[in-house]
Amino acid sequence: MEASTLQTFFQQLINGLSLGSIYALLALGYTMVYGIIKLINFAHGDIYMLGAFWGYYVINFWHFNFLFALLSAMLVGAVAGVIIEYFAYRPLRHAPRITALITAIGVSFLLENGMSYLYGSTPRDFPQIIEPVNYHVFGVLISNIQILILVTACLLMVILQVIIKKTKMGKAMRAVSVDPDAAELVGINLNRTISFTFALGSSMAGAAGVLIGLYYNSIDPLMGMTPGIKAFVAAVVGGIGSVPGASIGGFLIGLLETLVQSVGLSAYKDAAVYFVLIVILLVLPAGIFGKNIKEKV
Amino acid sequence: MTILKANFKYNVSWLIIMVAGFYLMNTLMLMGIIDSFIENMLVVIGINIILATGLNLVIGFAGQFSLGHAGFMAIGAYATAIITTNSATAGGFYTSIVVGVIIAIIAAIIVGVPTLRLRGDYLAIATMGAAEIIRIIINNLQITNGPSGMFNIPQFATWPVVYIMVCVTTILIANFVRSRAGRAIKSVREDEIAAESAGINTTNWKLAAFVFGAATAAIAGSLDASYLQTIAPTNFGIMESISILIIVVLGGVGSLTGSVVAAVVLGILDTALQNFGTLRMVIYAAALILIMIFKPTGLLGSHELSFKHLFSGTKRKGRVRS
């Protein structure tokens, strides 16, 4: 009895971590963009959808392997992010923030409905390029795809952290997020830095799209909506603007969701997420890592 | 007395416009120029006007960024649906509006007291979460018939009822904004600390605006349920809150006239694009982005249509403050 409870717990832990790593990858994009231009980029979830569709096409028609599909989806995500920033958000940089938010929602509608118009809104099966293998470790079922998602996500987060902390561009990003005017005064190219931030965040979303395609096996043009909102919740819970916060927040939301589901309240799993969000915001108004970490990206 | 006299002209002008508008519509309907298709559009526009002016009160005048309007709308809609299916009388319908408003006020107080301490985008995301919680609870209750929603709700919300409700809520909101209360909430929007130091209880006034907005949303929800006769929890999701927000921002944050104009423009646009199928939303989204880029403050900015300004023209000096 004891052992099986423990097994269930670890099983849910593994499931929650895989789901959470997807949320974490998405939350990173939200947190970086919000940190730098204070905009909730509603179109971020749709870049994740674009990444998934790109993966679907290159694997089916160009027979890419997993690694190339992932890398090319990241590239496509980055390009899409930069284009969206250039045409939709850059003209509004000095407009009221609520206007930029509505524009972001407009971009999101445009991507969702444009893809529905072009490719139809019926879900498609994502090609299984990696043969699913299940491992039994002490009675806990772990699939190779879960391991792949976790490892890829963690690797990407580490790379991101290194870029932000160690490179010149990362330093510029941190400077712009603290004070854009002062950053411009010391010779930082504002436009290029913001474009780079969008490219970096959107490439994470592109990668998340391919990973979720492998995990859930089904993609459709509206797939980005709910995970997008939950990833933003994860970013807020972790402390918006903080990269470690977004990762922790993502894992937290993923774990919470699987936990609520495993105790038989799956109808209320979204409600639980929002409830925890409200409670955390009331106790820690800047999120878990919002206060401890001064540096924002 | 002088103030009453000074405002008498403007109030009478508004009343004449409202009555004349009603008779104009009725005549056009009798003549057959407005068919049931256009009447449907008008009702949808009317409901959207109630929703948008209510949300504009919260966002534009009190400066509190709420993304949870659809949750309160759901409360009104379900109150009407449940009560009128059990007692299908006009009395039942009006009782259900009152019940919906009362429940929405209670819910708004429960949601507002803790969350209105938050600011800006944090408040938006918290109110969005609260509205989603309301929707998920409705989705799982027995009395609301769960995810499949409710059907065959008796129709009491005809075009005249909706028109009168639009007039009543707009008058109430406009007067609230121009009253002492309105000045208090506007001062909270401009600078919370300065308002507080001037002796304004910022928490109470923020809550008052939030609750007022929620109450009008519940009325709109009641009309919506009664007119469409079918409701489901999915109608009141985040997307509904966002589409109300779009009307507010498109018309101009802080302009009630703007909200009305935007609701009418979007209603007509929506009907005109009906034949385009899937492409409809693509065009809608592109139009939205373009309007925001080229007119970031919305169609009317913060301007209001005011007879006071029309009548007095440039003679601002002799104007009686009201």
Image: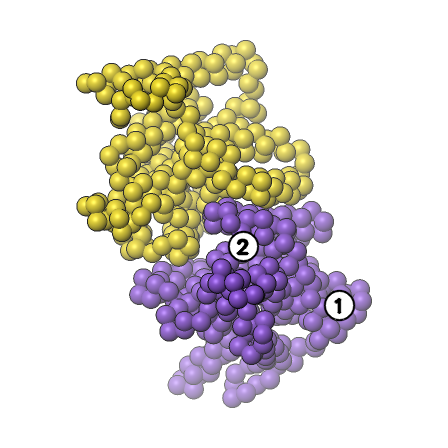
- Chain A colour in the picture: purple
Q: Mark 2: which secondary structure?
A: loop
Query: Residue A115 placed where, x, y %?
Result: 67, 51
What's the residue type where badge 1 is placed?
A: Ile
Q: Position of residue A240 (x, y in %)?
A: 44, 65
The disc, 2 or 1, on the residue closer to the chain's N-terminal end is 2
In percent of width and height, residue B11 lies at 32, 19
Q: Position of residue B204 (x, y in %)?
A: 23, 46
Extreme residue in the bottom direction: A138
Amino acid at pointer 2: Phe
Gap in angstroms between the C-alphas marked 2 and 1: 28 Å
Label 1 crowd (10 A; few <14 / some 14-19 / many >=20): some
Chain identity for the colour yellow used in the image: B
Q: Height in image: B131 above or below A144?
A: above
Residue appearing at x 57%, y 52% in the figure:
A89
Badge 1 is on which residue? A59
Q: Note whether residue A89 is visible.
A: yes
Q: Quadrant of residue A262?
A: bottom left
Which chain does the residue under circle 2 lie in? Answer: A
Query: Residue sitting at 73 percent across and 73 percent down?
Result: A68
Q: How many marks overall?
A: 2
Residue positioned 68% across, 61% down in the render: A79
For the residue labelled by badge 1, is the local secondary structure a helix, a strand or a loop? Answer: helix
Q: Which residue is mark 2?
A: A42
**Of discs 2 and 1, which sits in the foreground?**
2
Q: Pick the quarter of the image with the N terminus of chain A.
A: bottom left
Q: Chain of mark 1?
A: A
